Image (cartoon, helix red, strand yellow):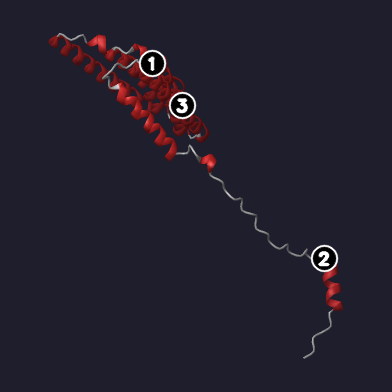
């Protein structure tokens, strides 16, 4: 039953991919547009998404497929951007989206899918570190070094990203180390008297005078 369902999913995705690819090349022929020149990174993206399909169909035991899936999908997206805008110089800083960012995203998905919260927290930290490296280095190369020319959208994009990163740190957990907490002393409960042995209880009854009416 499960094998038939998995086979149907792969057949559906494969047919959908071929139909979409055929439509793109057909449109390119009519419009005299070189589709392959711009869309070849889609094959890398599709290859990365196949890992997520395998993860979903394989259940919790296949959660580790999220890591290579995130890595190849991010690589395809980066190449799609660079190829479309001819911005290959962005490798100077965009590598941080591959490692540690995409690996961290994969670890987060792996941890959440397979029920490993420690792995998910580690992936979240790696993702945040990677995004910080990306924004800082991107702002340095695009604004200070001059990868983005005068009038380029990058001149506006990177300052906005730096502002958003600062707001995220301020509103997030960037200043948790400044918060001081007063330790609460443990509650003291009176100790109960030790239980008496039968001999001690008998001797107590003998020495206690009877109550007078």
**Residue 176 location (% of width, % of height):** 51, 41
Q: Secondary structure at mark 3?
A: helix
**Residue 42 location (% of width, % of height):** 30, 16
Earlier residue among tags 2 and 3: 3
Earlier residue among tags 3 and 1: 3
Relative to residue 96, is residue 20 drawn left or right?
Answer: left
Residue occupying the point 42% across, 19% down: 98
Q: Secondary structure at mark 1?
A: helix
Q: Quadrant of residue 147?
A: top left
Local crowd size for mark 1, using a 10 Å CA cut-off: few (<14), some (14–19), many (≥20): few
Q: Are marks 2 and 3 in contact (CB under 8 Å)?
A: no
The CA span between labels 2 and 3 is 63 Å
**Residue 94 location (% of width, % of height):** 39, 18
From the image, tell me which residue sits under label 1: 145
**Residue 190 location (% of width, % of height):** 71, 63
From the image, tell me which residue sits under label 2: 197
The mark closer to the camera, 2 or 3, is 3
The mark closer to the camera, 3 or 1, is 1
From the image, tell me which residue sits under label 3: 104
Q: Quadrant of residue 96?
A: top left
The CA span between labels 1 and 2 is 87 Å
Earlier residue among tags 1 and 2: 1
The CA span between labels 3 and 1 is 29 Å
Relative to residue 123, is residue 7 drawn left or right?
Answer: left
As drawn, 160 above or below 178:
above
């Amino acid at each position: 039953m499960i094998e038939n369902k998995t086979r149907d999913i792969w057949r559906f995705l494969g047919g959908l991919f071929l139909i979409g690819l055929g439509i793109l090349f057909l449109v390119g022929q009519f419009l005299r547009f070189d589709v392959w020149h711009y869309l070849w990174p889609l094959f890398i993206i599709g290859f990365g998404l196949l890992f997520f399909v395998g993860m979903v169909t394989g259940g919790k035991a296949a959660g580790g497929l999220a890591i290579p899936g995130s890595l190849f999908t991010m690589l395809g997206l980066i190449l799609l951007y660079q190829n479309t805008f001819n911005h290959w110089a962005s490798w100077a800083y965009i590598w941080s989206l591959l490692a540690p960012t995409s690996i961290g995203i994969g670890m987060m998905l792996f941890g959440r899918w397979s029920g490993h919260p420690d792995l998910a927290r580690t992936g979240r930290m790696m993702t945040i570190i990677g995004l910080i490296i990306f924004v800082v280095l991107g702002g340095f190369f695009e604004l200070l070094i001059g990868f983005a020319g005068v009038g380029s959208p990058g001149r506006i994009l990177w300052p906005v990203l730096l502002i958003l990163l600062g707001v995220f740190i301020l509103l997030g957990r960037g200043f948790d180390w400044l918060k001081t907490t007063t330790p609460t002393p443990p509650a003291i409960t009176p100790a109960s008297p030790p239980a008496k042995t039968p001999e001690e209880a008998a001797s107590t009854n003998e020495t206690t005078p009877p109550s007078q009416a």
